[in-house]
Image (cartoon, grey):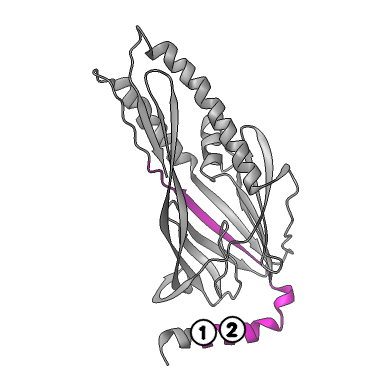
């Protein structure tokens, strides 16, 4: 019997013993997340601009800090909620609360909370964009997980490696010295690496991820790393899995249109400012920012 067959037998045995009291099985898992930004800037100018370089470095640092967060995954047999942990520093996350950074986090998907129901394949994503709350309705993605042979310990749990892929969209925003803006979108295939444990036989995980025979304790999707730091099973106080209902209800396609329209509006506003400052008689220059 090879390791994958042995693992499947072990997982099945866990589910057999687990099903007898699965109705009351609940838990809370805490995750620390960090999102990396593949961000490049090119300034087309005959003169160097140390102030621009300094501002860009500061912006990158603030963006990185805004994308470091803590989340709680509350789960039972079939449902879960994944929400940002409230802190004393000013609301959820405590970082990136200022308008620009908060908006950027929403564009990158860094301030969303999720409700997943694996029985009905329903998913709700709650997010804020430009001061407005949205509730995006969607169906769960069926990840094509490939079980690996590698194992490692996360806390006291033995975890197994699994991989899948997803299509990521890479957007390049550019603005020239004439004030005109351009957006170029490309699609790239990105590997997802998950570490799951059969010791907690719940098909749940952080963010939008799920579908393995056990709880996902660590995941890297090429953009964000999510690592579980604490798991509490069957706590004394009942875990409430609340279905989010705050915000304007839209489909994923409708939300994409809203976000695109707002981005185009912003590009026109900032393009106009740039034309006033960097057009004729100004300092000139153009830049390209690539965000993956």
Whether residue 35 is visible: yes
| Residue carrying label 2 | 14
Task: Nearest to the eye among marks 2 and 1: give it.
Answer: 1
Q: Is residue 59 left or right of residue 73?
A: left
Q: Residue at x 64, y 32 (%)?
A: 131
| The C terminus sits in image quarter | top left
Which mark is first along the chain, 1 or 2?
Answer: 1
Label 2 element class: helix
Q: Is residue 190 above or below residue 126?
A: below
Question: Marks 2 and 1, how far apart in space?
Answer: 10 Å
Q: Nearer the viewer, residue 281 or 230?
A: 281
Q: Is residue 68 left or right of residue 204?
A: left
- Residue 255, x across and y down, in percent: 63, 42
* Magenta stretch in the rendered image: 9-38
Q: Which mark is residue 8?
A: 1
Q: Is residue 88 left or right of residue 44?
A: right
User: Per the image, is 35 magenta?
Assistant: yes
Q: Nearer the viewer, residue 189 or 26?
A: 189
| The N terminus sits in image quarter | bottom left
Q: Residue at x 74, y 56 (%)?
A: 242
Q: Which mark is residue 213?
A: none
Q: Is residue 284 above or below residue 14?
A: above
- Residue 11, x across and y down, in percent: 55, 82
Q: Nearer the viewer, residue 191 or 216?
A: 191
- Residue 94, x across and y down, in percent: 56, 40
- Residue 162, x across and y down, in percent: 45, 70
User: Per the image, is 13 magenta?
Assistant: yes
Residue 64 found in image quarter: top left
């Amino acid at each position: 019997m090879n390791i994958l067959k042995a693992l499947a037998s072990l997982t099945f045995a866990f589910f057999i013993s687990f099903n007898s009291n699965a109705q009351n099985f609940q838990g809370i898992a805490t995750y620390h997340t960090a999102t990396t930004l593949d961000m490049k800037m090119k300034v087309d100018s005959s003169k160097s601009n140390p102030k621009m370089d300094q501002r860009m470095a500061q912006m990158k640092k603030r963006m990185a800090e805004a994308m470091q967060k803590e989340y709680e995954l509350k789960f039972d047999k079939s449902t879960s909620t994944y929400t940002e942990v409230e802190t004393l520093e000013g609301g959820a996350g405590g970082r990136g609360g200022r308008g620009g950074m908060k908006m950027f986090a929403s564009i990158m998907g860094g301030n969303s909370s999720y409700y997943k129901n694996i029985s009905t394949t329903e998913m709700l994503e709650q997010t804020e964009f430009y001061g407005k709350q949205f509730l995006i309705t969607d169906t769960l993605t069926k990840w094509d997980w490939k079980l690996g042979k590698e194992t490692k310990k996360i806390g006291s749990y033995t975890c197994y490696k699994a991989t899948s892929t997803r299509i990521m969209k890479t957007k390049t925003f550019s603005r020239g010295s004439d004030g005109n803006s351009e957006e170029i979108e490309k699609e790239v295939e990105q590997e997802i690496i998950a570490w799951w444990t059969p010791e907690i036989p719940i098909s749940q995980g952080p963010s939008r991820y799920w579908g393995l025979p056990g709880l996902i304790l660590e995941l890297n999707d090429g953009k964000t790393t999510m690592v579980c730091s604490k798991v509490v099973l069957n706590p004394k106080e009942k875990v409430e899995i609340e279905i989010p209902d705050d915000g304007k209800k839209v489909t994923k396609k409708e939300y994409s249109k809203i976000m695109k329209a707002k981005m185009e509006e912003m590009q026109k506003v900032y393009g106009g400012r740039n034309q006033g400052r960097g057009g004729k008689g100004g300092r000139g220059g153009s830049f390209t920012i690539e965000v993956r």
